[in-house]
């Protein structure tokens, strides 16, 4: 049997300890599949004394995390520190620069600096892998990088944030409002104390940008992802959607679009969407993640599973290590980084589809006429409209509509016409209807 | 750029022509991902003159298929002839023996001879890949071989035959009987003129045996798969299941079991099962396939997509070719074939679970007492029971029950007690309830 693959593990949070636990629990199996042992030769974390629920005495603690990258006895650095920049990025750069392999679960870092790191890895001939950065234990990075490699993908989309999916599906199940379900998610450990990255869609945008690069063979463009979170979704929206045959999910969607000048553009959006009951994503509840890739030959493929958690994420980290141990780690973004295309972001106005629009309005005559006139003037055709009366506690009046298929720019224009109108008591919420 | 990967394509049915069409349509993308061109240097099929809807003049036709394996200008033989033995197997052996790579979509051949071929491939150092043999375009062979490699899998199961799934979900949707829906499936092109391999569960058993070997690191044991098909499922069973909160699906299930003597055994079964409404497999309708792998760290992963068809299957064939072109084809069964374990088949009687049992009985006093007494004597505890009266056209009387959780051997024993009883006018049907 070959020499062990020697790894340095930076970061001992839930994922880091999960990796150690996996390597201990499944040692023999991992060795058989990797063709050699995977040995942890150095560990580091911010706080040495913290009780992590596992015995770390068998592992060599190093005080200087950055020095891990320099050690002659390390083949691969596993970065589980987190944060898009700072120590994580310094370590990642140093590891690759020293010709070590790099395995990371750090979606923010890959979304922001993945191109630079891939270039460095290519120059140094070092493996660089990040299955754990997208959708936890689901092997979707591999699925898109290798499984669908023969396809031109037409669309990549999915439920990429377990926190939001937990909150939305619990709002659906209980009828409760966002704030209450966010609190429940925090109590259940599905949301962090500061939930901003999750509920504003940023975490999902990180993952979408990574998947889009792999699936379309384009350079990562995180800045080009248009993102809205779920904080404006109300229980009444979910009830309306249900009455119309939809559930509400935070969905990241990436596709290639042809611009007016005929050039190909990359459209990337994370938004709460209305998903038809019969679509597989509608059945995805709780903290589960699911990714759909539509290929010109493979058709619609669905990858579903636990999107986070120490054990699923550790499973993905060690899968990368096994690939590296076997010499089976390919180009991190499916094609060599130098061949990735640079595309401009698409124009969201050019999207043609149907939308759900909810207005919160003053309860007085003429409001409905004002809204429908704006729609008409902007060329938006209304398929259905429901006005809900004031509820018992004298709340707001809501008007919800679904448009016929049309260019998104018309909806934007209609809302611009209504902007500042005293008839609207809160900003309207637009959610696209996911195309089947 | 490196030399092209030169392939010989044997078999030009729908999949073979699909592969050619894919390599033509996505030529540039495939070349970028493969790191070199994939070039078809020889083709062969039974009938040269047949119109296949594509122009084959650019390709070098060879008359002797078996000679493909000997050609110096061929790197990989793509076997799309079909059939577990005969010319397909001869070609596969000859190709590997000559040190060529082998890519195949032939589930029957891999299920019957996969171990021999893998051994030959290992000796010759030749790649051997068969993503297309299981679940069409879904990259589930790769998913289990590499994606879940860090996990001890506890169970692998799924909907592995699109024909059966089409028939069962159409029976569910329309209320029609098996014979009518088989005919519809044949008319739609979802079932062959001789549907035996599909409807008797043999095709699903081929795929299950392959997945079990990869997922559990065991030698393929196709003979050990206990298989029943869907021909005995009636529309009334589907209606009863619906009333109880289930759909009926043909599910292949593989898991490791501990025998009485403490040795590990491999349980593999293909049977129509009752799937709870909320389980992801319940939402899988039509000719779609779906595979669930439950890992000790990854948790429950679902892979879903088109299980057959020329284009999805071609997608899987070319994905294998891209892996080979890049030098990324690993051990075909996840660990080197010499390290696969040989396990005895598990004892189905030891399964502990719940079952649906449907009796077709004579309409006379005492029948119910006879059945329930047999259940009691065999130690089967009944959770619910429905007796349906004779229907309008004077048909049979049916008694359907769901058991409490218990050992399967008790159900078998109860049925043995009733065997030959004049009260039963047809053999009973047992369908397990899929564990969530």
Image: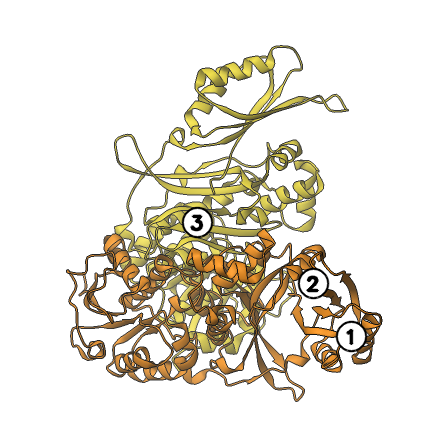
Chain colours: A yellow, B orange
Above or below: residue B261 compared with residue B419 = below
Query: Which residue has dot 2 on it?
Result: B395
| Disc 3 and disc 1 on one polypeptide chain | no
Q: Secondary structure at mark 3?
A: helix
Q: CA distance from mark 3 to mark 2?
A: 68 Å
Against A249, residue A362 (above or below) is above
Q: In 3D space, how far apart are the residues under numbered discs 3 and 1 (Cα atoms)?
A: 57 Å
Task: Classify mark 1: helix, strand or loop.
Answer: loop
Residue under label 1, please give it. B380
Q: Tell me which corner region of the image, top left, top right, bottom left or bottom right, holds residue B349.
A: bottom right
Same subunit, tags 1 and 2: yes
Question: Disc 1 or 2, which lies upstream in sequence?
Answer: 1
Disc 1 + disc 2, Cβ < 8 Å:
no
* Discs 3, 2 touching: Cβ within 8 Å: no
For the N terminus of chain B, give its image quadrant.
Answer: bottom left
Q: Which chain does tag 2 point to?
A: B
Task: Return the chain for callout 3.
Answer: A
Q: How many C-alpha atoms fall within 10 Å of the one at disc 1: few (<14), some, or many (≥20)?
A: many
Tag of residue A109: 3
């Amino acid at each position: 049997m070959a020499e062990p693959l020697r790894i340095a593990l930076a970061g001992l949070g839930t994922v880091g300890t999960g990796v150690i636990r996996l390597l201990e629990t499944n040692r023999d199996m991992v060795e058989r599949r990797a063709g050699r042992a995977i040995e942890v030769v150095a560990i580091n974390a911010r706080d040495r004394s913290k009780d992590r629920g596992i015995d770390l005495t068998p592992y060599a603690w190093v005080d200087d995390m950055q020095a891990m990258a320099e050690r002659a006895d390390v083949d691969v650095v596993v970065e589980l520190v987190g944060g898009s920049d700072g120590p994580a990025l310094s370590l990642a750069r140093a590891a690759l620069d020293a010709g070590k392999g790099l395995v990371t679960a750090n979606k923010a870092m890959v979304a922001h600096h993945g191109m630079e790191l891939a270039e460095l890895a290519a120059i140094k001939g070092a493996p660089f892998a990040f299955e754990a950065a997208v959708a936890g234990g689901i092997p979707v990075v591999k699925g898109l990088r290798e499984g669908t490699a023969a396809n031109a993908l037409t669309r990549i989309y999915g439920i990429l944030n377990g926190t939001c999916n937990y909150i939305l599906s619990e709002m659906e199940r209980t009828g409760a409002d966002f704030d209450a379900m966010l609190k429940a998610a925090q109590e259940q450990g599905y949301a962090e104390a500061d939930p901003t990255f999750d509920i504003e869609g940023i975490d999902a945008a990180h993952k979408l940008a990574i998947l889009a690069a792999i699936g379309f063979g384009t350079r990562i463009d995180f800045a080009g992802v248009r993102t809205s979170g779920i904080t404006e979704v109300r229980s009444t929206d979910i009830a309306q959607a249900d009455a119309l045959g939809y559930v509400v999910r935070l969905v990241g969607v990436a596709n290639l679009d042809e611009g007016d000048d005929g050039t190909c553009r990359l459209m990337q959006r994370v938004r709460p969407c209305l998903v038809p009951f019969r679509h597989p994503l509608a059945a995805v509840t709780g903290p589960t993640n699911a990714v759909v890739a539509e290929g010109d030959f493979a058709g619609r493929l669905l990858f579903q599973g636990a999107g986070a958690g120490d054990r699923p994420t550790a499973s993905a980290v060690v899968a990368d290590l096994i690939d590296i141990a076997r010499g089976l780690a390919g180009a991190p973004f499916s094609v060599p980084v130098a061949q990735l295309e640079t595309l401009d972001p698409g124009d969201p106005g050019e999207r043609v589809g149907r939308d759900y629009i909810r207005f919160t309005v003053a309860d007085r005559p003429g409001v409905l006429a004002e809204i429908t006139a704006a729609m008409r003037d902007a060329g938006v055709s209304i398929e259905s409209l429901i006005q809900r009366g004031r509820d018992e506690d004298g709340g707001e009046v809501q008007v919800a509509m679904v448009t016929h298929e049309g260019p998104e720019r018309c909806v934007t224009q209609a809302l611009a016409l209504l902007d500042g109108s005293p008839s609207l008591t809160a900003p309207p919420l637009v959610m696209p209807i996911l195309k089947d």
